[in-house]
Image: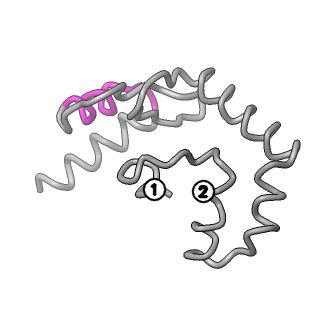
Amino acid sequence: MQHGFYVDNEDRKAPAFCPRICEELGPDPDAFLQRFESDELKRRTAEDFRQTRRSGVSSFPTILLWLPSGFVLIARGFARFEQMRDAVAGSTGEAGTKYREFKRLAVT
């Protein structure tokens, strides 16, 4: 799907896109298309997009860290490893503790 979209500039929402992908991957094209166009899948997809927006995602790529207290934004758009590492290390609670432990073990 990624190749068709990014390289071949195909519209993934177009019904003609699905049969070719199904032939490559194995699902029955008619059953896939019926499910793809179903109200249930449209509802679930819309809910996924709403959850994404609530999580603070507004660009690609976005890196979020899940903590029991909720999501922490690590990077929005391009970020170097060091920036993301520092964001994780600076997170409160479990993530910061695990990062410091990892760093300690990596140094010794």
The answer to whether residue 48 is above or below residue 35 is above
Q: Where does residue 44 sit, x and y in percent of width and height? A: 78, 40
Q: Residue at x 38, y 26 (%)?
A: 91
Identify the residue position indicated by label 2 in the image.
Answer: 17
Asked which secondary structure carries label 1, the reply is: helix
Query: Number of numbered discs present?
Result: 2
Residue 30: assigned label:
none
The answer to whether residue 56 is above or below residue 15 is above
Q: Residue at x 64, y 56 (%)?
A: 16
Q: Residue at x 33, y 33 (%)?
A: 88
Separation of marks 2 and 1 at Cα, in angstroms = 8 Å
**Residue 63 image-quadrant placement:** top left
N-terminal of the two: label 2 or label 1? 1
40 lies left or right of 14: right
Q: Where does residue 3 sit, x and y in percent of width and height? A: 41, 57
Near mark 2 (Cα within 10 A), the count class, few <14, some 14-19 or many ≥20, is some
**Residue type at the position of mark 2:** Phe
Asked which secondary structure carries label 2, the reply is: helix
Q: Where does residue 93 sit, x and y in percent of width and height? A: 45, 30
Residue extending furthest front?
16
Q: Nearer the viewer, residue 67 or 39?
A: 39
Q: Are marks 2 and 1 in contact (CB under 8 Å)?
A: yes
Bounds of the magenta segment: 83-93
Residue 4: assigned label:
1
Magenta stretch secondary structure, dominant: helix
56 lies left or right of 63: right
Q: Residue at x 82, y 37 (%)?
A: 43
The color scheme shown is: one colour
**Residue type at the position of mark 1:** Gly
